[in-house]
Amino acid sequence: MLCCHCVRNIAYYRAGWRDGVLLQDTDFWRNVTGNFLDIAVLEWCKLFADQKAKHHWKRVVPEPDSFLASLLNHVGETEDSFDAYCTEMRTYRDKFLAHLDAERTMQIPRLNTALDTSVFLFGTVRSGYSEMLSDAPENLESFYENRLQYAESEYPAT
């Protein structure tokens, strides 16, 4: 479920942008779009950045060591670069989302790795527990594309 929420919110966030420009630059749409980013980061951190969290991937995959190696290979990351990405996501969450610290410059996290890792984790969980996930999408990449197209159709014409 968290993988689906993360991916859906990444799709909805991305739908609001074209070539680095917010499609609807009003207070309402800035807040809506920002909220999609925030939820995506929160959900992703539950899955990947908080090792003590109830839903961290190490608690749900059957073979954590082989899963990590496969995940890193799939997304083209090293363990160090993935750890740095986790730090980037936690920093955004901790410094600007959960708390408003004294930081003056917000670094919006890159979302490609969040999307790719969520899709990979979902595929692993889906293949091992399909009977428990009967109402979940079959394929999270297709789900992402579907939600992106849907969200793009919902934005008012500019």
Image (tube, rainbow, N blue to C red):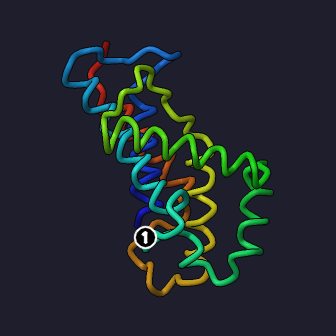
Q: Residue at x 75, y 57 (%)?
A: 72
Would you say 44 lies left or right of 88 here? left
Would you say 127 lies left or right of 92 here? right
Residue beneath label 1, please?
A: 136
Would you say 4 lies left or right of 127 here? left
Give whichever of 16, 93 is nearer the camera.
Answer: 93
Quarter holding residue 65: bottom right
Q: x, y percentage for residue 16?
A: 38, 27
Q: Is residue 99 above or below residue 42?
A: above
Which structural element holds mark 1? loop
Q: Residue at x 56, y 70 (%)?
A: 57
Q: Residue at x 50, y 16 (%)?
A: 20
Task: Work out which quarter of the rendered image holds the C terminus and state it.
Answer: top left
Amino acid, disc 1: Ala
Give whichever of 63, 36 is nearer the camera.
Answer: 63
Q: x, y percentage for residue 141?
A: 57, 53
